[in-house]
Structure formats: structure tokens, C-alpha cells
Amino acid sequence: MSIVSLTNKTLWGILLILLLLFSTESYYNRNFLAQSLPAEAVVVSVEEAGILHGSKLRLTTEYQTVIDIDVNTVRSVQVGDAVPVVYNRLIPAQLKVNYVYELWFKSLLYLLLILIVAIVMFLFRTCCNWRTKKLKKLRSEGDRIYTQFKSVEAVLNATKDGKHPYQIISTWLDQKTNKTYSFKSQYLWDNPVDYIMDQIITVMIDKKNKKEYLMDLDFLPDNIKREN
């Protein structure tokens, strides 16, 4: 499986999980609100806890039962504040602060994460499409130069499944400028050294920018060229 395919599947997996969490949380909230009663609770203690504020609320139910309930709120509150709440008629300990952003905080958070992942997927797909078009253009319109094979090197700062990829390195002397250029192949996850029979390797370069190029690896078997 290629890195592009693996990344795409991973992003889709994350997106589906977030959609499931969003749907579950929204469904739970709707059901909770459908069987809850509105009321006011009094803040009896406050404990700061990072982004969320830990508070103890004292609620008097419709049956005049007084209970204390620990909640975490986005909004900062003070001792003595009256806070609008909704609570489960059958299980009063199931209580939520009755502000839109409090009731739907998790749903909104999941929705934000869904949006971020969707944007990342769009940018990733756009980048892949751009790269594919660029490589096709280089193959069809790029200047073909004949470079000298130099070596096969392991890329030690990249790993996948405990393996390091390899790159073919070649060089080319521009006779017009007397400048030597170095070229690297795409990542190859099997050592290609045994398949390099010719010391001359073709490279297609962009006519305007020699930093944009594509090494012709047609001499390698498909299983070597394929990204695992």
C-alpha cells in the first residue's frame, strides 16, 4: 500500500470516527433535552481546572429535593451565582448547564474537528493531484538529460514497517554553465542496486527550473518501483 493511499485511508478513518461521535453526542443531547426539566441551580463552590471550570451546583428539584452536583463548565462562574440548568426528571443527577455552548460543547468540538480533517483531506488531495499532473507534464514535456549513476543510498531518517527506503543518486554536468547537478529518485522500499545495469540514467527536468525533475525508473521491475 502506498504512503498516499495509507494517508488517505487514515484520514477517512478519522473522519468517519468523528462523524460517529458527533452523531452519537447530538442524538444523546436531543434525547436528554426531550425528557428534561428547566430549573435554576446555585453555585456553592468553584474549582479552576484549565479550559473547563469545575463547579458544584445545588439544585432544588420539582419535588423539593436538594442535591449537589459536580459539573464542568466552559463559562466561568462565581459562588452564589444562579445558573440555568436542565436536569433529567427521573435522574436529577443527570444535569447540564442550560447555555447553548454548554449543552452542545462536545458536538461543536466534534464538528470543528470534522471541518479541520475535511480541510486537510481537501488540501492533501489537491497536493497529490498537483504532484501527479506535474510528474505527467515532466514526463511528456520535460527536457531529457542523461545523468551518471553515482550510488544507491538508504534514507535513514525515514522508516515504514521497520524498513528504510532507498534512493538512486545520479549526477549531470551542464556543459553550458559547467555546473554539476545531483538528482534523487523517489523512495524505493527495496534495494534497486542489483537492477542497475547501465551507468546512464535518464532524467526529465523542467525547462525553467532544474530543481523540478523526474528520474526515469522504467528499467526497474514494477515491484521495486511500486510504493509499498
Image (cartoon, grey):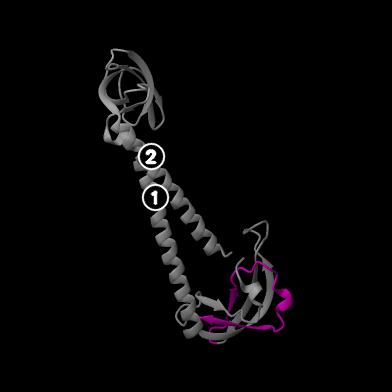
Q: CA distance from mark 1 to mark 2?
A: 14 Å
42 sits left or right of 182 in the view: left
Q: Quadrant of residue 168?
A: bottom right
Q: Is residue 155 above or below residue 103?
A: below
Local crowd size for mark 2, using a 10 Å CA cut-off: few (<14), some (14–19), many (≥20)? some
Kindly state the secondary structure of the residue where label 1 is placed: helix
Residue depicted at x 57% and y 85%: 145
Q: Quadrant of residue 178?
A: bottom right
Q: Is residue 13 left or right of residue 75?
A: right
In-front residue for pair 137/117: 117
Q: Tell me where the magenta segment starts and ends, as one range.
A: 176-205
Q: Quadrant of residue 26?
A: top left
On screen, 167 above or below 136?
A: above
Q: Quadrant of the C terminus?
A: bottom right
Residue at image location 27% in from the left, 25% down from the top: 37
195 in the magenta segment = yes
**What percent of the width, then of the height, locates residue 152?**
69, 71
Residue 147 vertical placement versus 161 (above, below): below
Residue at image mark 1: 114
Q: Nearer the viewer, residue 161 or 33?
A: 33
Placement of 128 over or under 145, stated as above or below? above
Residue 155's label in the rendered image is none
The residue positioned 74% from the left and 76% from the top of the image is 194
Label 2 sits on what residue type?
Glu
Front-lying residue, 67 or 116: 67
Residue pointed to by mark 2: 25
Q: Amino acid at mark 1?
A: Ile
Residue 44 is covered by the magenta coloring: no
Density class for disc 1 (Cα within 10 Å; few <14, some 14-19, many ≥20) is some
The local secondary structure at tag 2 comes to helix
In the rendering, at what x and y percent does residue 195 appear?
71, 78
